[in-house]
Image: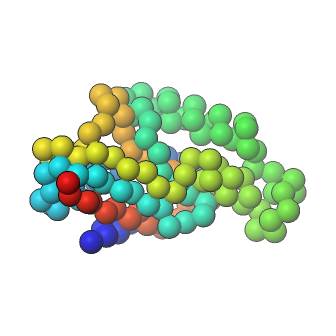
Amino acid sequence: MVTRLSISTDSREQLVDVTGQVQEVLRTSGVDSGVVTLFVPHTTAAVTINEKADPSVVADLLKGLSEIIPHRAAYYRHVEGNSDAHIKASLLGSALQVLAENGELVLGTWQGIYFCEFDGPRSRKLWVKITPD
């Protein structure tokens, strides 16, 4: 079964910590051990794991991506003006997997799961599938 989480973003580029929401899906699934697969069904959004202890890491990640891939609509061919969002989403990726043990996500001490918005603000989806061992 796939659980569809709703994610609302407030700005054009934003990383939303969804660790707690994903953990709750795992908890309610009753699965003790397995793999949690996350999938973003959008071409201008992504999902990633990164540090969640220091919020400046998120700010630095967004700043770094914007410097590498600037939002300059006239520079790109895509007429919608959001080519930078497509590139950023492709680089970070639309899916990832996290292990589950004892009903908990297996993440490092400082790690969190982030939904990455690059063309907001929007209402988005994050699909979660839990596969037991």
Task: Describe residue 79's horizontal placement relative to residue 98 as left or right.
Answer: right
Residue nearest the viewer, comparing 15 with 29? 29
Q: How is the image coloured?
A: rainbow
Residue 124's spot in the image, x, y percent? Answer: 47, 66
Q: Which residue is drawn at the image coordinates 84% and 57% (left, top)?
A: 76
User: On screen, 131 above or below 63?
Assistant: below
Q: Position of residue 108 (x, y in %)?
A: 32, 31
* Residue 58 placement, left or right of 69: left
x, y (%) of residue 117? 54, 54
Q: Residue furthest bottom?
A: 1
Marker count (numbered): 0
Image quadrant holding the C terminus, namely bottom left
- Tell me if I can see residue 81 in this picture: yes
Residue visible at 48% across and 62% down in the picture: 40
**Residue found 27% across the figure and 72% down from its top:** 1
Estimate the x, y position of residue 118 in percent, counting from the top left: 60, 54
| Residue 7 seen anywhere in this rendered image of the structure | no
| Relative vertical location of residue 11 with respect to residue 67 in this rendering, above or below | below
Residue at position x 69%, y 52% from top?
Answer: 87
- Horizontally, is 66 left or right of 72 in the view? left
Relative to the observer, which residue lies in front, 9 or 112? 112
In the displayed orientation, state which residue is furthest to the front.
Answer: 133
